[in-house]
């Protein structure tokens, strides 16, 4: 349409009676609406609005299955029979399918028994797949079910199950239906907490005809609950239920909370949704600070955090969504230790108008077949919307406030949006909250409001025509939490149930709104570690806690949860032993021996004996009755207490303790034990005070603070003094009266008194040993821990034989810390105690480990030795061993035996040896000696690989070759020379293992010469100082030979070798010279050849070459160049010159030299080349540096310059050296240099002066380059 927006008309649809039945939207508006509704944003998986229903028909009849499927894009459907695809086109005589307006049907014609099956329709689009099932049963002329009563039996039932997050769990039962009717199957339905389950991504169901199976994929805490299998037949139903517990997965970081659960989306609009969740059972090492909400747009993989500040409430409004797009949400909990793992993601939700969502879910309606008339109506498109209505604050917390309202009635046909305004109570200033972009949804969440302040709110509607009038403002709303934390639940009562479960009941929280449920926690009595029984809140006040350990003594507590958070934990329950409940009870017998213990003006204390028969269970408590007696007349009995109590007392303060006894009497201490008072008073006993006194002294208190124990060790007593002891009990009301005092007890250590001894035997068993020499025939050793009888007999094993008793620790751990005492009955107080501390336990465990796994010590670890003939010896020395010690020889984890190796273990000396005659390439690896001596073991190894192995192998081969050479005549000292003071050179060598028949011959250049002394063969060669004559130069050789073998030796005295006779002390003293880049150390030799070996040392360590440090030879100069010397380069330097016979060292100490920056240098000012016209004057100035101030000199063509009329030389301020040449001529051309020198070095700055004649200027092509400073200009001349 080409009409403008205001000219558009809307039309009414009327039927034949002119009744208005709705509006008709013109095509152009429909197109605009479809453009606005982005199809990609509205995509969602197939969903069955109406599922096909199972049917039972007679044979020969036809049956039709119907269903309705919604989804975008439009799903493709397919029908299956027992999971086999139905091809209706190939079998038109049997099947007919139809799809119209998202309604699908399958007609099965002329049914017979083979058509009895489970039929399935599958709907598929790009967003996913969904299926629905319907059974079809065909009867053959009569009903086999008529008059039949089905009996259902469920066997192989699933029990209470425990899983962990991320695991997969299957529940299953075998179902037997009797009698068996052909093609009849019962209906199988699964429930969780009373809600029927449907197949989904997380829940898979299977029915095989006999076995019903439910599979929970990737468990989450949402899957925890009571699962029920219901089997429905025509005659009734049968069920079986069991609880499934889902434990939290291990946290990635210690102390962080576990993941929240049950994330859901509510009140979804075009750009707004409310996300709720449930708090986890475990908060971690500290309370949860708040929660972080993440969102994920469907079709992407990036999670975006919705809130910057953690929210405390388990409810959060998410704004800023894009209309038409689908989102999922997850939640993470945060405490002081870190962030939890994310929860399971919520189901996808589309950001769209609720009315559009309802229309999409409903699917298309049936086609309209009536008559439609079109009548024009007044235009309302351009109308400014009216005010919104029913504005209210639906939620208010410290973090945010949520507003909701209804759209305006007057708004035309185009959509409206909204502006939200706030006003601080007490002011008249309204401030628009969403100034940048109006919201599309009639919901809005306001953040960043000041806590404790009061605000009013209002809303304005707007469209393309303008902004409407504001709505009515809300009342004053104070920013703060409207929802309070739940109150603490009531008393908790545990009841024995089975060997692994306890029934827990509790009183409901009295003050609570929007209760989510309760978490139950359990702790083994005394250990203080609380573990959740359920990871999903339960709403009842009764719960069966499974998975407990039999015979554990457990206590329970409960806390309530709502959106605001957790309540405080309830009071701990009484301890309950995990045992199966007693099947048959009987009434206990009556108590006996009721006596009056104490009476005062307004109260009295009663005591009685427990009943002789308990009726098969522990006595829970007693009811007290009373009656009055007046003038001999008695009244009826009345109950004093309306509920049973373990003990009822009207006594304010506690009664006195009783049963005092003393043991472990020593010269300076004794241990007092007692029983709690019979009457606690009006509150429980909280502690005890111990008094003591000498025989005729006054009572004194032992301790400043009360003790909760029923024992105390009294120390600091005087030997030989008698003492009496007594006890006071106290409660919240005060301190009760004293107990009866003990008899006088003498503080002494009797002769023969033994103490408990801790022992670790050879097997590493730790035990406590107590011996008694005065034991009687009927005496017994009574062991206790912390002076209480053992309740956990699995920790200790008691062995008693004669007068010796041994308490053995079965599995020593921190649980065993405490004071262990032993008392011998029927003796005169024979007793002792031992306190096991954590440090002592650690020491005993170390000793136990050493005894269980003893180590054989080595005096010397495995070493290697190279022997004659190149033989290799591996050896080690054992420090301590017995005659039963055995050695295992191992090479590269393989046991080796005699053959290639020779092994020996000398048990007299403790030396282990292994020999190898020849070291081969295959012998590279690890050699090990493994020792076993009874239980003791020892091990020593030697790794022989890489360069170390190659070097040893080379030495072994050399030694073997030398041994072979020494079997015949051989040279002990090879041919060498010495220079005598007369400058004669003596050639000499020493031979061995010769006999008269051994031939000895001297050769020079291969020509035999005369022999000399046989034991020390010498040849004198006349020489001149420093150099042998050319006549004597040559290669000298000596040969030995007989029938046993031969040997020879050479000495090179040719031009290449005669330099060896040059004395190394012909070198000059070591000197230092400074250069532009550093320093040079140098020395001159009279004659240098390449075979002369030179080494440089710094602080007696060889100097390694690098880019900064280099050495070399120039002519007869030996030099070491060092660039940019530092403080580390100070010290003594030496040059070591080896001349073939010995070495000579020259040393120079640079410890006192200054830094490089102190030596004389020319730091700038002089050019490289100067070109000047003849007749001009030349003036150059160089910048000089050095400490001390250097000496300055000028040279021309290597000749010094002196100051005269033509040359003026100056040195000013110790920094500036200048030269002035007046009226230069061509004679002044040449190479000049500025020389500077101080004690740290010398430097020369060279430059060239070129004087030209003006007539020749055109013959030169000059290229001038300047660096920006006049003293650094250079001139390059090209000819």
Image (cartoon, rainbow, N blue to C red):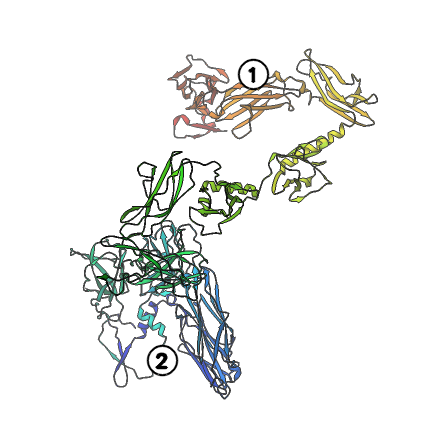
Residues 679 and 1204: in front is: 679
User: How far across and how far down the image is residue 1037, in percent?
Assistant: 76, 22
Q: Mark 1 against mark 2, which lies toward the viewer?
A: 2
Question: Label 1 neighbourhood size at 10 Å, few (<14), some (14-19), many (20+)?
Answer: some
In this view, the residue farthest toward the bottom is 141
- Which residue shows up at 42% across the image and 27% down it? 1273
Q: Which residue is mark 2?
A: 366
Label 2 environment density (alpha carbons within 10 Å; few <14, some 14–19, many ≥20): few
Q: Is residue 326 visible?
A: no
Residue 454 in picture, x, y percent from top left: 20, 56
The numbered disc on residue 1069 is 1
Q: Is residue 1104 visible?
A: yes
Identify the residue at horizontal 48%, vertical 52% (top origin). 793
Q: In the image, residue 1199 lies at what x, y percent?
A: 50, 15
- Viewer-proximal residue, 975 or 679? 679
Count of picture labels: 2
Residue toward you, 863 or 1056: 863
Dividing the image into 4 quarters, which one contains the N terminus? bottom left
Residue 671 sits in quarter: top left
Q: Quadrant of residue 276?
A: bottom left
Marks 1 and 2, how far apart at CA: 118 Å
Q: Secondary structure at mark 2?
A: loop
Q: Secondary structure at mark 1?
A: loop
Residue with the most extreme top position = 982
Of 728 and 116, which appears nearest the observer?
A: 728
Tell me the number on the disc at residue 148: none
From the top left corner, tell me how far across and down residue 309 is, in percent: 32, 53
| 534 lies left or right of 766 | left
Do tag 1 and tag 2 residues touch (Cβ < 8 Å)? no
Q: Earlier in the sequence, mark 1 or mark 2?
A: 2
């Amino acid at each position: 349409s080409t009409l403008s927006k205001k000219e558009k008309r809307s039309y009414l649809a009327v039927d034949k009676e002119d009744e208005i039945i709705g509006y008709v939207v013109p095509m152009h508006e429909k197109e605009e609406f479809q453009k606005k509704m982005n199809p990609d944003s509205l995509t969602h998986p197939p969903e069955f609005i109406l599922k096909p229903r199972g049917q039972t028909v007679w044979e020969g009849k036809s049956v039709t299955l119907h269903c309705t499927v919604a989804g975008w894009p439009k799903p493709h459907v397919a029908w299956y029979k027992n999971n086999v695809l139905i091809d209706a086109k190939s079998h038109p005589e049997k099947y007919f399918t139809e799809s119209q307006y998202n309604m699908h049907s399958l007609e099965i014609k002329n049914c017979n028994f083979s058509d009895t099956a489970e039929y399935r329709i599958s709907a598929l689009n790009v967003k996913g797949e969904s299926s629905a099932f319907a059974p079809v049963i065909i009867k053959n002329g009569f009903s086999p079910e008529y008059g039949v009563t089905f009996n259902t039996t469920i066997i192989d039932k699933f029990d209470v199950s425990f899983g962990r997050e991320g695991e997969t769990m299957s529940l299953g039962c075998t179902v037997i239906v009797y009698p068996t009717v052909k093609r009849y199957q019962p209906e199988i339905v699964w429930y969780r907490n009373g809600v029927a389950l449907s197949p989904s991504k997380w829940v898979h169901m299977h029915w095989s005809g006999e076995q019903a199976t439910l599979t929970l994929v990737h468990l989450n805490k949402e899957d925890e609950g009571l699962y029920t299998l219901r089997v429905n037949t025509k005659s009734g139903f049968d069920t079986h239920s069991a609880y499934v517990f889902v434990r939290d997965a291990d946290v990635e970081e210690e102390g962080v909370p576990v993941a929240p659960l049950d994330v859901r989306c509510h009140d979804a609009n075009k750009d707004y949704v409310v996300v709720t969740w449930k708090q986890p059972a475990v908060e971690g090492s500290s309370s949860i600070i708040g929660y972080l909400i993440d969102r994920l747009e469907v079709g992407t993989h990036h999670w975006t955090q919705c809130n910057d500040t953690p929210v405390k409430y388990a409810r959060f409004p998410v704004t800023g969504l894009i209309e038409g797009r689908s989102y999922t949400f997850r939640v993470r909990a945060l405490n002081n230790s870190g962030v939890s793992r994310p929860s399971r993601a919520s189901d996808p939700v589309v950001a769209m108008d609720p009315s559009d969502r309802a229309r999409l879910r409903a699917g298309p309606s049936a086609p309209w077949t009536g008559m439609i008339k079109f009548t024009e109506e007044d235009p309302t498109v351009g109308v400014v919307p009216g005010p919104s209505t029913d504005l209210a604050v639906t939620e208010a917390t410290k973090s945010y406030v949520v507003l909701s309202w209804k759209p305006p009635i007057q708004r035309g046909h185009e959509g409206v949006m909204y502006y939200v305004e706030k006003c601080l109570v007490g002011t008249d200033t309204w401030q628009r909250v969403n100034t940048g972009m109006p919201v599309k949804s009639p919901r809005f969440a306001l953040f960043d409001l000041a806590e404790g302040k009061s605000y009013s709110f209002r809303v304005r509607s707007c469209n393309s025509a303008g902004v409407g009038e504001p709505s009515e403002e809300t009342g004053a709303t104070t920013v703060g939490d409207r929802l309070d934390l739940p109150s603490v639940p009531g008393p908790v009562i545990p009841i024995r149930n089975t060997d692994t479960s306890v029934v827990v009941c509790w009183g409901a929280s009295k003050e609570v709104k929007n209760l989510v449920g309760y978490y139950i926690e359990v702790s083994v009595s005394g250990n203080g570690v609380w573990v959740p029984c359920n990871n999903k809140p339960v709403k009842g006040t009764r719960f069966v806690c499974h998975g407990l350990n039999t015979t554990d003594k457990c206590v329970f507590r409960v806390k309530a949860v709502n959106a605001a958070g957790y309540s405080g934990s309830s009071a701990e329950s009484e301890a309950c032993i995990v045992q199966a409940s007693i099947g048959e009870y009987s009434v206990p017998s009556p108590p006996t021996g009721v006596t009056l213990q104490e009476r005062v003006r307004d109260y009295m204390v009663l005591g009685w004996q427990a009943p002789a028969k308990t009726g098969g269970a522990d006595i829970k408590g007693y009811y007290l009755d009373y009656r009055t007696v007046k003038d001999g007349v008695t009244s009826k009995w009345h109950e004093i207490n309306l509920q049973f109590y373990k003990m009822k007392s009207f006594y304010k303060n506690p009664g006195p303790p009783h049963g005092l006894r003393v043991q472990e009497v020593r010269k300076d201490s004794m241990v007092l034990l007692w029983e709690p008072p019979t009457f606690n008073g009006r509150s429980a006993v909280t502690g005890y005070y111990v008094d003591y006194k000498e025989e005729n002294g006054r009572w004194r208190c032992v301790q400043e603070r009360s003790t909760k124990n029923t024992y105390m060790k009294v120390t600091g007593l005087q030997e030989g003094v008698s003492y009496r002891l007594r006890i006071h009990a106290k409660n919240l009301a005060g301190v009760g009266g004293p107990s009866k005092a003990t008899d006088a007890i003498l503080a002494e250590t009797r002769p023969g008194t033994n103490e408990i001894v801790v022992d670790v035997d050879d097997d590493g068993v730790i035990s406590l040993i107590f011996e008694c020499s005065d034991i009687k025939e009927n005496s017994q050793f009574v062991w206790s821990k912390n002076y209480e009888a053992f309740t956990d007999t699995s920790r200790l094993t008691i062995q008693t034989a004669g007068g010796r008793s041994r308490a053995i620790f079965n599995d020593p751990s921190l649980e065993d810390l405490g004071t262990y005492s032993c008392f011998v009955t029927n003796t005169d107080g024979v007793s002792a105690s031992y306190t096991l501390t954590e440090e002592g336990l650690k020491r005993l465990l170390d000793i136990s480990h050493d005894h269980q796994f003893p180590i054989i010590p080595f005096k010397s670890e495995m070493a290697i030795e190279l022997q004659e003939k190149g033989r290799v010896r591996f050896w080690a020395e054992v420090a301590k061993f017995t005659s039963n010690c055995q050695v295992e020889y191992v090479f590269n984890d393989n046991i080796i035996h005699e053959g290639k190796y020779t092994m020996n273990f000398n048990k007299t000396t403790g030396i282990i040896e292994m020999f190898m005659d020849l070291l081969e390439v295959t012998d590279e690896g690890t050699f090990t000696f493994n020792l076993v001596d009874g239980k003791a073991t020892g091990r020593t190894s030697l790794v022989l690989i890489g360069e170390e192995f190659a070097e040893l192998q080379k030495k072994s081969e050399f030694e073997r070759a030398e041994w072979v050479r020494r079997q015949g005549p051989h040279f002990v000292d090879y041919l060498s020379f010495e220079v005598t003071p007369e400058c004669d050179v003596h050639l000499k060598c020493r031979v061995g293992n010769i006999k008269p028949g051994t031939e000895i011959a001297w050769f020079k250049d291969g020509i035999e010469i005369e022999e000399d002394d046989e034991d020390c063969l010498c040849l004198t060669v006349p020489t001149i100082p420093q150099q042998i004559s050319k006549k004597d130069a040559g290669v000298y050789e000596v040969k030995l030979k007989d029938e046993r073998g031969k040997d020879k030796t050479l000495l090179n005295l040719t031009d290449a070798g005669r330099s060896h006779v040059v004395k190394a002390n012909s070198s000059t003293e070591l000197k230092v010279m400074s250069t532009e880049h550093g320093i040079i150390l140098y020395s001159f030799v009279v004659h240098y050849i390449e075979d002369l070996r030179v080494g440089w040392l710094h602080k007696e360590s060889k100097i390694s070459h690098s880019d900064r440090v280099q050495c070399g030879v120039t002519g007869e100069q030996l030099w070491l160049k060092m660039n940019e010397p530092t403080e580390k380069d100070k010290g003594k330097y030496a040059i070591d010159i080896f001349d073939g016979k010995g070495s000579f060292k020259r040393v120079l100490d640079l410890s006192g030299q200054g830094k490089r920056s102190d030596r004389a240098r020319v730091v700038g000012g002089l050019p490289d080349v100067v070109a000047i016209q003849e007749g001009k004057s030349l003036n150059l100035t160089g910048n000089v540096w050095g400490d001390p101030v250097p000496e300055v000199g000028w040279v021309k063509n290597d000749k010094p310059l002196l100051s005269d009329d033509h040359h003026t030389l100056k040195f000013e301020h110790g920094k500036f050296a200048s030269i002035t040449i007046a009226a230069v001529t061509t004679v002044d051309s040449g190479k000049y240099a500025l020389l500077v020198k101080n004690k740290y070095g010398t430097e020369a700055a060279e430059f060239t002066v070129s004087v030209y004649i003006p007539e020749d200027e055109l013959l030169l092509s000059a290229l001038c380059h300047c660096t920006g400073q006049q003293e650094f200009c250079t001139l390059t001349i090209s000819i």
